[in-house]
Structure formats: C-alpha cells, structure tokens
Amino acid sequence: MTIAEIKQAIMQDPANQAMTAQGWQPIFTAYPETKILLIGQAPGIKTQLKEDVFRDQSGKKLRQWLNVSEETFYDSKKISVLPLDFYFPGKAKTGDLPPRLDFAEKWHPLLLEQMPQVKLTILIGLYAQKFYLQERAKKTLTATVQAYKEYLPEYFPLPHPSPLNIRWFKNNPYFEAEMVPELQAIVKAALE
C-alpha cells in the first residue's frame, strides 16, 4: 500500500467513521524520504480543525529544540509526524482524552514500512514513550527522558514542548542545558 492508500483505508475504517463523517482528515505526515520521525500523542481540536500539525507554540519550541528551520520541519519531507491517534480524541475533565492505543498498533506498522530511511524516532510525551519503549520505559516521563542515552541511536524521548509544561522545564533545567544540545547534534547528523 502507498501512503495515500493507507490514508484512505484509515478514513474508511469503521472505527473512524464518526470522524470521517464530520469531515475530519487523519492528522499525520509521512514521506518515503523521512529521516526523523516524531511520534506524539494525538492532535488537539485546533490542530484537527486546521489539519496541520505542530504549527503552533508547541511546534515553535520543538523546532528550537531540534534546531531546524520551518522549511526543514514542514516542507523538506525529511521530518514526519505520526501521533498515536490521528484524530482528536475528545475532551477529558482536564485536558484531552488519551489516544486510542489500538489505533497505533493497527496503522503505524503500515506507515513505517513506507519510511525506510528513518534514522531517529523522537518520542514526545509519556504515551508515545510507553507505546514504543514498552517495558524499557521508566516509571515516569522524567525518568525516561533522563535515561535518553539508553534508547539511542533509535529513539530519543522528549517531554511535550507545550507552553503548559513550564513547571516541568523549571524543575528539570538539565534538559535544555544538556540534552537539547545533544539532540541538536543528533538531528543534524540524521538530516545530512
């Protein structure tokens, strides 16, 4: 299957009929020439309605962490984004509902087959880390992020770049002081 055929299959899947009926597109990017794959949670409602991923303050922070231009991030096809669920999962009492984990089990392997040149997979947030690292993930996001060297060269775990995570960044100054420069060097090498 091609990436376009996979997208059509996702839209036609009975599990996604309510979203398709609303006119929602699955939110992801995938290209055969991808070098860096970003795995996140699920699109928020604004992302779902804009049909564009990481074109917000979180995306700006993420591009700074990666040290890549908007052109490289959005237009080069060297960076792809696969959330664990390609649709807004709905609102919870605090924040959004978690992604449907069976969604990633079903669709990620098909899309990963279409991206044979991936050199680095960046796992953004707890859900992505637990799904991809499984028993190798630590008990908390902070512990997993701190142990990032254990997952290299395949994976690099990150917190979510949301402005709402300001407390986490203040409590973990090593992240931007030590980890981000190393991440930037790894990203640069992967893109070359």
Image: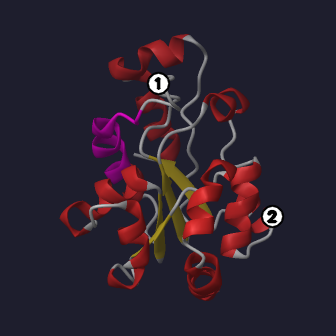
Callout 2: helix, strand or loop?
A: helix
Q: Name the colouring of the figure.
A: secondary structure
Q: Position of residue 88 (x, y in %)?
A: 53, 29
The quadrant of the picture occupied by the N terminus is top left
Q: Overall secondary structure of the magenta stretch?
A: helix
Q: Position of residue 133 (x, y in %)?
A: 28, 64
Q: Residue at x 34, y 44 (%)?
A: 104
Q: Position of residue 150 (x, y in %)?
A: 32, 83
- Mark number for residue 71? 2
Q: Which residue has dot 1 on it?
A: 92
The quadrant of the picture occupied by the C terminus is bottom right
Lower sequence index among marks 1 and 2: 2
Residue numbers of the magenta segment: 98-110
Q: Is 107 inside the magenta-drawn segment?
A: yes
Tag 1: amino acid: Ala
Horizontal side, residue 172 vs residue 115: left or right: right
Tag 2: amino acid: Glu
